[in-house]
Amino acid sequence: MSNEKKQPILLDRRSFLGNTGKIVLSGTAIALMSGMSSAGAMSTDSSDSQEQDVRILNTAIGAEHEAVAAYQLGAESGLLSKGVLNVALQFQGHHKEHIELLASTVGKLGGTAIDAKSYYDFPVHKLKREKDVLTFAAGLERGAISAYAGAIPLFDNSDLAKAAASILADEAMHWAILRQALGLDPVPGAFFS
Amino acid sequence: MCALATVTNADSDMDVREGKRIYTQCTGCHSPDYNRTGPKHCGILGRAAGGVKNFEYTKAMSNSGIIWTSATLNQFLLSPFNTVPGTSMGFSGIASERERQQLIAYLSQLDERNALCN
């Protein structure tokens, strides 16, 4: 039993990347949202609860922007090998799609989606190796999953809850892949909190 | 400033440890030591709500008049939206009283004596 034994950081490239680099969420997500038949129009909610939904969505958009910026930092760090870099960019692309979906929903609800911050206070000094970047990304994904799990019960509109669950599922996949790449158990339990 | 509950008993270390685990529900938006989607938590106990510099709070939070103590945190973390209507903290709350207490034990030691906060 040695903790020293190096865990492979990467699976073989094929299983890590899957057989396509394609982004699969958007179709589902857009289908989910188009099923909403314009949240604003169909909603019988009071404007207060719509405003609440907008605030929750905007907070989620803020967290998604942070994830996009974090993957950008990772991608530009020069610490990622080619295979990992491709995966990082793919995941970043998913987060961008989450933002598009959330922002268009905010628009439908009559709100204004927030923009990315001009500056993120990331712990850059702690990122010295590929493993550190993966650990950082896994932490953000884990946090995002928790954040969606904590937000879903608040949505007044169940279509929004459904869309948020779809995003949560995507981010849970990211988290599992990143953990696998780090040599950790990719699915550490039956429940997530 | 004297009404703050400080954690002193032997159970407290365990509570802090458990609280740290529960805090993973917050780390999608918060870090103890720097502002993210949510404000940093270092120095939270005794601070006025909306009091972190360079963080853009909602008016609802800034004008809430809350001072963060064990009691007000307990109420807020049970139900952020009911405690501060209009807050942007999109988090439904922690139903378990025990878990809230453990989390508050963790938050309470994020003060200037904590290496994370220096």
Image (cartoon, helix red, strand yellow):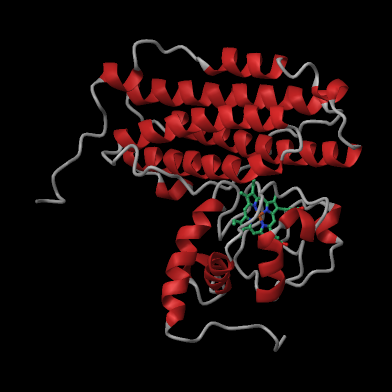
Instruction: Using the image as rendered, state which of residue B117 and residue A34 is in the foreground.
Output: A34
Residue B61 point in image, percent of width and height:
80, 58
Residue A50 seen: yes
Residue A62 point in image, percent of width and height:
67, 38
> In the picture, residue A13 is in which quadrant?
top left
Residue closest to the far left: A1
Residue A70 point in image, percent of width and height:
52, 36
Q: Residue at x 43, y 29 (%)?
A: A173
Left or right relative to A183: residue A150? right
Q: Residue at x 63, y 28 (%)?
A: A162
Instruction: Using the image as rendered, state which of residue B63 and residue A152 is in the foreground.
Output: A152
Q: Residue at x 70, y 86 (%)?
A: B3
Left or right relative to A27: residue B54? right
Instruction: Using the image as rendered, state which of residue B34 and residue B26 is in the foreground.
Output: B26
Q: Is residue A181 above or below residue A142?
A: above
Left or right relative to B43: residue A175? left
Q: Is residue A165 above or below residue B116?
A: above
Instruction: Using the image as rendered, state which of residue A122 and residue A93 is in the foreground.
Output: A93
Q: Residue at x 62, y 58 (%)?
A: B40
Left or right relative to B56: residue A62? left
Residue A11 point in image, percent of width and height:
25, 26
